Image: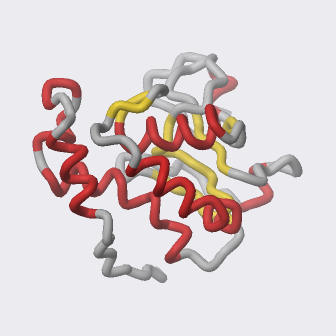
Amino acid sequence: LNVTLHDHQPKWRDKIEIMRLNGMANHSHLYAHAGNYLGTWQRIDIPLYISAEYCLLLDSDTVVVRPFSLSDFGLNITATLAFSSEAEGKRRAVNAGVALLNIPFLRKTLEEFYSFIWSHPDPKFYLGPSDQGAYRDFYQRRLRKLTYLDVEFNVKPYYRSEDTWR
């Protein structure tokens, strides 16, 4: 197993803590603990650590059930970033926990993304809360660059369609 651990000590940690404290604790369990909340935001620095064209980001609760390669994403692979859906049958890019990231694109937009995030004193973004909302607001709403990652990369155990499981 080839695993690289990065000692990620973000300079923006205090800004995220202020955002967490300004959040509505009853809306998410993540607001209850500074470490949990910071952990969700750490993905924004992936372009600083990955030296590849693409990165598939999978939240820790994601289960990979079969091997795959970059070719499985097809010839129309995103030139930006792609999020999967959270619901069977809905082709909406909403889940930052299953994301295909074009690292050069994210590097190019990172400083502008930081500025966008820090302009918000609380975790409320137009298209959702916290890091997922920030990604969607900035890359989907502002830049129009967020694309859809097929649900086959984010199947839930309760999905009913056999086509989803293939």
Q: Is residue 149 above or below residue 25?
A: below
Residue found at x 31% / y 64%:
12
Residue 35 image position (x, y, % from top left): 17, 57
Locate the C terminus by quadrant.
top right
Q: Is residue 158 left or right of residue 9?
A: right
Q: Quadrant of residue 140?
A: top right
Would you place residue 136 above or below residue 35 in this image? above
Percent of width and height locating residue 4? 43, 82
Q: Position of residue 45 (x, y in %)?
A: 46, 66
For the point 37% across and 80% down, which residue is it? 5
> Residue 23: which quarter of the image?
top left
Check the image and name the residue furthest to the front.
Answer: 119
**Residue at the extreme right:** 75
Residue at image position (24%, 45%) is 19
Q: Is residue 162 above or below residue 65?
A: above
Q: Position of residue 17 (x, y in %)?
A: 19, 53
Residue drawn where x is 33% and y is 51% of the image: 40
